[in-house]
Amino acid sequence: MNEREMDARSSEPPSVSGPPTTPGQTQTPRRQLKRNSAACERCRKRKQKCDGKLPSCGPCLLVRARCVPSERLLIRVDPNCQCETLKERVSDLESQLEALRIERRRDVASPGPSHHFYREPEYTTTERVAYHGRILLPTFTESDGGSSLRPPLRGSLWKLWAVDTDSQGSLRPATNATGLPLASNSEALVEVFFKNRWPQLPFFHKPTFIHDDFLPLRRGESAHPLSSFRVNMVLAIASAETNSKDSSQQQHTHKAFFQAAIKDLSTVLMADDLDCIQCLLLLCLYGTNEPQSVNIWYTLGLALRIGLGMDLHREETWSAGQTLLSRELARRIFWCTYALDRSISIAMGRPLGINDSDITVPLPQQLTDEQLCSTEAVPNLTPSPKDMSTFLHVIKLRQINSSIYTSLHAASASAHDDCGSLDALREAHYTDLNTWLVTAPRYGPASGVAMLQTAEWFQIAYHYAVLSLHRPSRAFSVSNISSLRLCADSAISLITCYNTLYAKNRITYTFVALNSLFMAGVTMLYALRSSPVIRNELSKGIAKANIDMCQRLLQGVSDGRSVGERCAVVVGRLGQATMGVFDRGQSLDDDIDTEFMSWFGLKLKKDQNAEMGKQVTPSVDIPWNDLFIDGFDWFDAGNYNHLDLTT
């Protein structure tokens, strides 16, 4: 039976004939049957019987037609029937969340200002280190740590700081917290931080920090979960900056603040991205004073990766609806991470965290923190110690440092025979450095500027960059007297500038600063020992005075740390050997020459062929000619097993 025949039969009128009835029989009305199904759309249009089966009725299934159920079969739920129940549930959850927040605030901020800044730790430091992982491990270690790299790939920083027990965090927290002058000088310490360290790394907005973090903790009020960490870290960094008659008490103070801060380190790692980066930068800033208390390389890398994951380095990601404060603060945070990455990576001889070519975000505007609170501000034309002028100039220097480092000191760099291209490259960088120095901001003496804003500091940064530009590198070796003379002049000038700041009690200690002073002393002695021309230009008495000044500064700048004493011992031993060259006219001590080479990471091949060994560099002593064949790595330590740094 086809579909047409079925439709014809279904269209016939139903029979009205019923069973016959007798005249005497009373006809009872037929009971209405309950309808349990409704015809589908197709059966309804054809007025045919539909069995109402789902998903397809019998007639539709028989002809393989699409069966659309009737709307009478659809159960429609009132959309408002659950609203009241859901609203009550949401209200209950919100009340529970608020109760948890209040409980958390009570745990973070208990009554009493001194309790916020320092509390007696309940657990040992060893447990915290194991819990927080690599952040609290030393930056420089004596062991290889499972690395397959050879010891020659470790530079002077490892040789000097790996055995430095003074900088390592104490395994036992201070037991007497009541004797610490916390509440009395906390405001002064905050001012020290924003005066001495903020100009070079302004990743904090001072009014926001004071209003949201510092004042609530001082008053014993509820604050942000990260307020305790931020305030304690700021006080720890500032305590390390200030001078104290009792050095042991001073060291105890800043370590107590640091130990109080790291108890909230797990909260830091769970915070929002920008807040987490700020806190990690605080750890890195403290690590520049105490490199064995914080693994700067790991912590800084973590902060940089979080920033790159947020695309802070891309201008295209910024929205037009951002406020001036949020936009400028995000830019400051990224460029602070960039500047610190350049400084630490170059000092440690490791790869840079990000290429300059990958950065499109503009520099921060030259504004003060107070100007950021307004909706729109005009950048300052005259530099001020409280605006971004110092920081912007530091970024320009880090960009020049980055270009010099990647072009001359890259690990994959090879020796170039084209001296013309070498001279042109160095001349271009040298011009950039001179332009940078001339355009450095100048602040009046009445401004009360920090060390990082003085003319002497800009001179120090300039001369250290010149040393990096003209010293022997992986790509090029020193082959003329002019490069040696520039190295000697910049090394002596750097030492003299440090002496001027030390005489004014303006020195801010960091391990990078101490290492730059030490390497300047070694470079000065290297130039004197390698070139008779430079020895003739500088008398023996002046050279001896410069050596004594460098030793005194190494001991003074380090604030009594044992690493400063070790640096002074090395410079003194190398200086005595160099003084002997003034009398003999030529170096005859192979052990001292080998020690010089080890500090520069010299890779000297013992089996050089005779032809290369006979090459003589003009104006350079014969024992140094083999040094210039392959050049050396400034940061590689070489084989230094013969050194005795404990004497």
Image (tube, grey):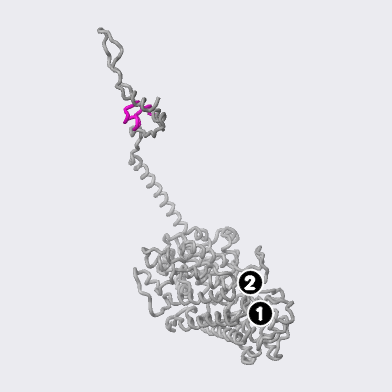
Give the secondary structure at mark 2: helix
Image quadrant assignment for residue 250:
bottom right
Residue 636 locus on image (x, y percent): 64, 73
Give the secondary structure at mark 1: helix
Please say whether residue 47 is one of the residues in the magenta stretch.
Answer: yes
Other-residue count near label 2 (Cα within 10 Å), few / some / many at <14 / 14–19 / ≥20: many
Quick one: label 2 or label 1, which is nearer the N terminus? 2
Q: Is residue 593 left or right of residue 546?
A: right
Label 2 sits on residue? 158
Other-residue count near label 1 (Cα within 10 Å), few / some / many at <14 / 14–19 / ≥20: many
Q: Nearer the viewer, residue 426 or 18?
A: 18
Please tell me whether residue 205 is drawn above or below residue 27 in the rendered image.
Answer: below
Image quadrant assignment for residue 13:
top left
Q: Nearer the viewer, residue 447 or 336?
A: 336
Label disc, if present, on residue 570 of the rendered structure:
1
Which segment did they paint magenta?
A: 37-52
Residue 575 locus on image (x, y percent): 66, 84
Q: Is residue 451 left or right of residue 625?
A: left
Identify residue type, mark 2: Trp
Label disc, if present, on residue 400 of the rendered structure:
none
Residue 329 locus on image (x, y percent): 42, 67
Residue 616 locus on image (x, y percent): 69, 86
Q: Quadrant of the C terminus?
A: bottom right
What is the CA distance from the residue labelled 2 to the residue labelled 1?
A: 15 Å
Identify residue type, mark 1: Val
Q: Is residue 373 visible?
A: yes
